[in-house]
Image (spheres, rainbow, N blue to C red):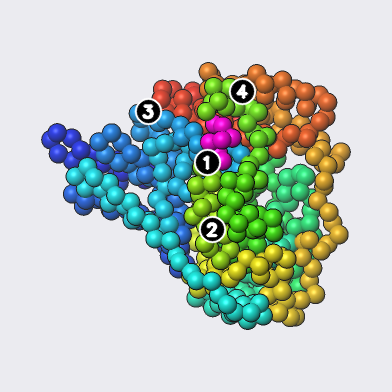
Amino acid sequence: MLRLPCLIVESRPTGTVARGDTEWAAPEQANGVGRAGWNWDGERLHAHTGRYGFRPLFVRRLADGVALSPSLVRLMSIGGSLPIDDSAMAVFLRIGFFMGEDTPFRDVRVLPPGGRLEWRDGVLSVEATYPRVRESVMTRAAAIDAFIDVFRDAVRRADPGAQRNVVPLSGGRDSRHILFELCASGHPPERCLTLRNYPPRGTRDVVVAAEIARAVGVTHEVVEETPSRASAELRKNLLTHFCADEHAWFMALAERLSGQDTAVWDGIGGDVLSNGHRLEASLLALARAGNVEQLAQTMLDEGAMRMVAPALAARWTREAAVARLTEELRHHLDAPNPIGSYVFWNRTRREIALVPFGVWNAAGRVITPYLDPAVYDLLASLPADLFIDKRFHPDAIRRGYPAHAYLRFDTETGLRPVRSPNGTPADAPYYRRLLRETGAYVARLRRPRLVRRSWLASRVAYWYLRGDFSDTQLMPFAMYLAQLDGVIQWCESRDPELGAAAVHS
């Protein structure tokens, strides 16, 4: 993780000193949505991100300079004090992702959407360029027809015949739409891959995805999860720069795709832009009434705070989280879909984007057709009321591909996700292994500063012995805090033993 690109530029009494990679650019992807890079010409540093800022480029302020890297851990490793950002962590542990340009550290930020950075003679400036849209007045039927057309054009502009295509296929909408359009364009993918998810999510994706692939005549493969969830969490935290509570389940799929010359078609953005993911009438009403603080209160969950060390829990308060979240929500109140705008520019950009622009990178080219500018501009202009019933995207798919309109969606199967927090009796070995490995990893941490180890040890033992798995959803946060703590200590001490312990389960 320390061999990733990095540039450090500092002002010294004798002049400016630059160390590391004076030029770097991320691999090109369709429509440039994954653009990021920098250039140092000896006098001036320029850096940039793409239209949405989905590929993170981290910027660390130094006492007399600046450091850049696509890896947060790489910037941590250059040494020096890195104070925790209390308000950012207060939000993260309650919602699972960071706001705006926040990271766990006060002096490290990501470049914003359409970001432009310049550093010269000790002066740093950063600008953002968010895409702006006006609210559309088209009817629902016209909007659906327009969506079908712009999405078809987006897939074909992405040149699907250039490489072997692979579609990670679920039982939902986004990947299904991609698959149908690839087939309609005459470039069906080589295969579709579906994860059999960790408990208690159930098997709806596997069942429905198999039906979809069979209907279009494309090979379908089921990928089994990595047996050790704890090990997957540790790898995920590094690949996502300690900026996501999700994605451990994608590690098995990343391993299957690693080193293959494929084009992976990812549905990022589809659920938020076209079907109102996380949009509820009650939330929309609060946004439209300007009750931003109350809206923020409804979004926070206190569960993970139980395992935070007391000294930090006193700083990472709910009040701090509400204040930071309220600040961010205010930026989206004028959008045609204020909840969708908030989710897209925060959860989608700062967390979900770390799959196609992080986890999938080892697979080769990644194509994200819902981020095509024409698709985004259309969907972002539509009023929230079109998405409240969660039927916009299913209706578009059935209208656009009538030969496959009979195929059910995962929510129409009658196969309910397991509601019990304890899963099924067959899930008990999975939960016990997760508890055992999480407890063992946290126990090895020297001088824990972030995680409340004694409380966690007692609760893990209780849950394990009683067979009460109701709070196992907290284990990823426990792994996150312990690993972040370990990496911080390793960066401060350069102790190779600490480094190995932080990375491996």
Is 318 included in the stretch rendered in magenta?
yes
Q: Secondary structure at mark 3?
A: loop
Q: Residues within 10 Å of mark 1 (few under 14, many from 20)?
A: some
- Numbered badge on residue 452: 4
The correct choice, above or below, for 50 with respect to 57 in the image is below
Determine which residue is flagged by label 1: 323
Label 3 – label 1 distance at C-alpha: 26 Å
Residue 498 percent coordinates (x, y): 49, 24
Q: Secondary structure at mark 4?
A: loop
Q: Residues within 10 Å of mark 3 (few under 14, many from 20)?
A: few
| C-beta proximity under 8 Å, tags 1 and 2 | no
Q: Which amino acid does the dot numbered 3 rest on? A: Ser
Label 1 – label 2 distance at C-alpha: 16 Å
Determine which residue is flagged by label 2: 333
Name the residue located 72 percent from the left edge and 74 percent from the top edge.
395
251, 127: nearer the viewer: 127
Name the residue located 62 percent from the left edge and 21 percent from the top edge.
453
Label 2 – label 4 distance at C-alpha: 38 Å
Residue 420 percent coordinates (x, y): 83, 42
Quadrant of residue 338 within the rendered picture: bottom right
Q: Which amino acid does the dot numbered 1 rest on? A: Ala
Q: Which amino acid does the dot numbered 4 rest on? A: Arg
- Highlighted range, magenta: 316-323
Label 4 – label 1 distance at C-alpha: 25 Å
| C-beta proximity under 8 Å, tags 2 and 3 | no
Query: Is residue 121 something one can see in this rendering?
Result: yes
Determine which residue is flagged by label 3: 81
Total labels drawn: 4
The correct choice, above or below, for 335 with respect to 474 in the image is below
> Which numbered disc, 2 or 4, marks the residue closer to the eye?
2
Query: Is residue 362 something one can see in this rendering?
Result: no
